[in-house]
Amino acid sequence: MLYQLEGSQALARAIALCRPKVVCAYPITPQTHIVEGLGELVHSGQLQDCEYLNVESEMGAISVAIGSQAAGVRSYTATSSQGLLYMMEAVYNASGLELPIVMTLGNRAIGSPINIWNDHADAMSARDAGWLMMFAESNQEAVDLHIQAFKIAETVKCPIMICVDGFILTHAYEQVDIPEQGEVDEFLPEYSPHIFMDPKRPLAIGAMVSPTDFMEVRYLSHLRQKNALKVIDQVSLEFSAKFKRNSGGLIRQYNVENAETVIVAMGSVLGTIKDTVDELNMTKDGQFGVLSIISYRPFPKQEIRDILKGAKRVIVLEKAFALGRGGILAEEVEMALKGENVGVSSVIAGLGGKIITKEMLKECFLNPMENECFLGLNQEVVNREYRPLVNNDVQ
């Protein structure tokens, strides 16, 4: 059914339809409205047979999710930015223990300086933590990805993080199609854990692993990620057949066929990129296309290579970068294209919520820089504040 909803409230309703048994809630902007919405649904009785736990910190939230999931019940939590960093030790534990927790990450910049607006630095900090990671382009896709997430995680036996751009999506009001409970019940079966803590059958989890076996444990996590590529695609196909709309999957193409330049990106900025490409193609005869990466972990390397190897130029636009090195996503796309004669340009944009306009994108796409580009960078500020080293500074 169609509703005009704030993104966070739409997500709360979608998550409730998946019938979690435990919701661990600790508020941090911009994900707060999601867990508040779930609390209201539990309090009103619309979400039944669910224990809603207010915890004392983000570490408490992920720890409760680990404990409840290990006890054999479907569990959910949410966080953002520094909250993810605070729980990071246990984030690694969740994947190592093969626990299919679903977590929403309301993407937000990481300080210092403090900034509550959107970029993808928080998600990038967890890219090697062993969680599946998927990025939503719109609130409709965010809703759909959460419904798919429980099925994907429970099939692969791996936790999953759904990344939703803070404020741009979480606080935006738009029309969203929320499925009926019966439809979700038909799509998502009851959770049947492959192993769980039971006093009648005592077992230990999270025990120390010696050097003899640690590499094998990590390799098994790697295999689960690789196996997830097929599962993510399959669940997306099942979702499309059931709900009559394409959502999720590994990647999505937009006007890529015969395009000379393909822009690669993740998250809500794709809407602005597609509008820009449409306007450019009216005068440039379809020279520009867009590749949306939905699944960042596992990284669909072969699928990306197959699509981009026919392009003359690839421009990777991302909302995070590695200090001292450069674009994180751009480097991964370059690795996927190794051996192909395709130029890859890296564009860093939107850090800390910095505005991204169509005019800026047009200039960037029409005149890509060979070196790294920081879109909208105020060079006057940089020149005023930066004092380069001189020989006398190096002893």
Image (spheres, rainbow, N blue to C red):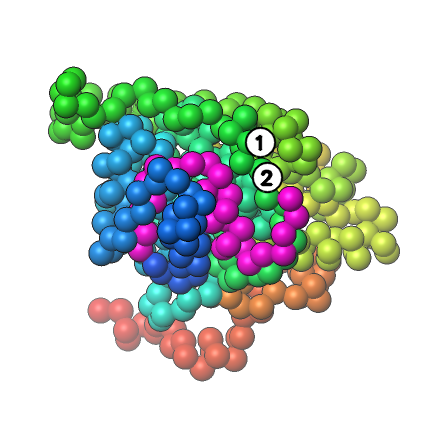
Q: Which mark is residue 193?
A: none
Whole-percent x and y of residue 208? 13, 29
The CA distance from mark 1 to mark 2 is 6 Å
Residue labelled with disc 1: 183
Residue neighbourhood size for the residue with mark 1, other residues' Cα within 10 Å, grouped as few (<14), some (14–19), many (≥20): few
Asked if the stretch drawn in magenta spans residue 345, the answer is no
75 horizontally vs 241: left or right: left
Residue at 53% from the left image edge and 75% from the top image edge: 379
Residue at 50% from the left image edge and 47% from the top image edge: 13
Along the line of sight, the residue nearer the viewer: 370 or 394? 370
Return the residue found at the far front. 45
Amino acid beneath label 2 = Pro
For label 1, the SS is helix
Whole-percent x and y of residue 3? 63, 52
Residue at 42% from the left image edge and 26% from the top image edge: 190
Residue at 34% from the left image edge and 74% from the top image edge: 390
